[in-house]
Image (spheres, rainbow, N blue to C red):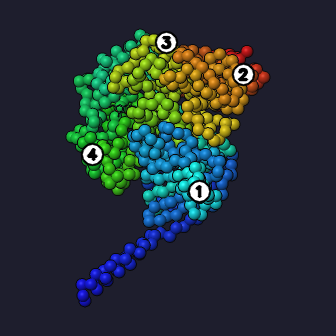
Amino acid sequence: MSTRTLLLILIISSLVACKTVNPPTNNPDKKLSWEHPFTGTFRTKAGNPPTFNLLSVANRKPRAEAINTLPDTPVPIDLKDIEASVINGRTCLKFPLGKEEQIYGFGLNFKTVAQRGRIFRLHVDHYGSEDNGRTHAPVPFFVSSKGYGVLVNAARYIDVSVGSAVRKDSKNPPVARDRNTDRAWDAQPYSDNIEMVIPEAGVEIILFTGKNLMEVVQRFNLYCGGGIIPPKWGLGFWQRTPTLYNEEDIRKEAAGFEQNKFPLDVVGLEPGWHSKSYPCSFEWDPGRFPEPASFISEMTSKGIHLNLWMNPYHNPGGTLDKLLKGYTGSHTVWCGTVADYTIPEARKIMQDHLVKNQLDIGASGFKIDEVDGFDSWLWPDGAVFPSGRDGEQMRQTYGLQMMTLMDEIFRKKNQRTYGLSRAANAGSVSYPYAIYNDNYSHQDFITALVNASFSGILWEPEVRASGSSEEWVRRMQTVCFSPMAMINAWADGTKPWSFPDVYKACQDVAFLRMQLLPYLYSTFAQYYFEGKPPFRAMQLTEGFPASGEIKDQYMVGDNLLVAPLFKGDTGRKVILPPGKWFDFYTGKLAGEGTFTITSGLDKIPLFVRDGGMIPMISPIRQTSEWTNDKPLIVKVYGKADGHFALYNDDGKTFNFEKGEYSVQLLELKQGKGTVKHSGDAGFGYSGITWKFMTQ
Ligand code: GAL
């Protein structure tokens, strides 16, 4: 054969090879068969889902009884329009999207609430200033303004396009335009579907319906185990101290709060309580904390609870590092070993250590830091763990794993805890942790608080440093209307009185939070019993339009609307749900619909619905002073009839889960208030009086 002929054969055969396309490894099967386990709840499996998923890590049973008290609302779309195909080991999902439909959720976003048009890769990460799915809680759950929501239960990075992909088989395809001549040409033409890609050969999908968006969210929350009721002390004021503070510094810090007459229930100890940190030893530093047991009991006697910072990366050669040998992953983080807490033996080692060295001597909880990762220091996706889980599965669930690990030990002691975590995912609703981060945009913090309500998480918009008194007071005002009222002074030691000219306003709002504790606690009870988030997006309020981008105001419970002001604001627009709304402070009619307010530095604008009741106690500095024999005033706004379930329990154990609680039904009819008891276990308030705020 001549060289020319050989060359020709080679060229022809390579051309043929280029044309050969590998066939898909699985044939796409788009049909799904749905089961209907509870009212308004529909479940299916596409392909062959792995047993390790978000809800298997969260390890809670759906609260069937509570879900079934909600009406069996029909699915507002044709289930046949939800399609799934498994191709080359990945599951592709398609959901229909109507013309006017809006989509909320997909976890902790910081810039937007309405998510139509967005593209995400849901990936646990420290938020990097862009809503692209890399966030502390990238929950694969969305809520549609049509009245349904979908959870995609996979512990994987999930690609999502929310109305950006255009299909050839679209029922409403966009019309092609000519960019040369048509100015209305759009690079993102109209799309009528949501698409998701899960890098696994199957996935469980759970769909929830509801007569409104709140009911959809309630079902999702209850399916994942229901919300939490923090211990009472958790709702008091928190101060985190500088990293290297010792026992004496903390004593002085607590005394400073007493002298300056500022509420304080919790002091957060930062890395310096460990003898070594980054990676952590989980042993008390003998220099800074020579007598941890007696120090904690001394603080407890002063009504102060201690919360301990940690990241779960073990110091080489330390006790836990040695005990956990054989249970750690292939990579280290800051030279610390990373245990695989999906293995029961590893969990037990960590739990036993925490119980013996921290819980048994009185620590009240933990701040679970750095479980979100930055790619630069966390394990890579290719990491392997002894259980066979890979780096991606661990990254999506490590925060959740730590929460469940902690929950088991606190439950064993019948002691409620409340803490912080820098990562969460679907299923964390029944774990008592607020999520936080190192970013510091006040506006973004409020948008995160709003978004958290669609995803079964609580967001903590902590106060750190401030450039001015004005910014300080505005941040203090909003943090007092959040799941956790906390200053995180780990880096700079700021105190509530660091800006003396606005100290009075800071004190006022902190004491107002304390006065509102019965309202707040009852609102958390709704979270546990009914799945209603305590801090809510406006769309979760009855009668409020289901579509819209409202990211700077929110509801606390059913009755109270919070309209924060930011640095530079002297007023703002407020969008009210239907009906009359009243100024919280004066009881005067504030308005209806949309209106503009002006406000000084001294107050955060708050509004109450017509017939809204706000139960309040006298100002107290610590939650230990909150007892049911003290006077309780029910503030009443407007003239409409109303009702409110005033909840109370022992404030510290899980006995409420066995029925040990009291509910007093506050009824308002034609301007007269009555109190009826239901489920009274002796925690009801004895001295209830009514205050009609609107003349
Ligand atoms: C950060 C955390 C801060 C603080 C700090 C201590 O990662 O977000 O809140 O705890 O660690 O080193």
Discs 4/3, front: 3
- The type of residue carrying mark 4 is Thr
Q: Is residue 246 above or below residue 131?
A: above
As drawn, the label of residue 638 is: 2
Residue 464 position in % (x across, y down): 40, 25
Quadrant for the C terminus in the image: top right
Q: Residue at x 60, y 55 (%)?
A: 192
* Residue 126: % across, % down: 39, 40
Q: Are marks 4 and 3 in contact (CB under 8 Å)?
A: no
What kind of residue is marked 3? Answer: Lys
Q: Nearer the viewer, residue 102 or 352?
A: 102
**Who comes first in sequence, dot 4 or dot 3?**
4
Q: CA distance from mark 4 to mark 3?
A: 48 Å
Query: Which residue lies under the disc numbered 3?
Result: 504
**Amino acid at circle 1:** Arg
- Kindly identify which residue carries mark 4: 332
Alpha carbon separation for disc pair 3 and 1: 61 Å
Q: Position of residue 398 (x, y in %)?
A: 39, 45
State the residue lying farthest toward the bottom: 1
N-term mark: 1 or 2: 1
Q: Which mark is residue 177?
A: 1
The residue depicted at 57 percent of the width and 30 percent of the height is 553
Task: Work out how far the residue at label 1 is from the one at label 2, CA to CA, in angstroms.
Answer: 54 Å
Of the two numbered discs 4 and 1 in the rendering, the one whose residue sits closer to the viewer: 1
Task: Determine crowd level at label 2: few under 14, some 14-19, many 20+ residues with C-alpha closer than 10 A.
Answer: many
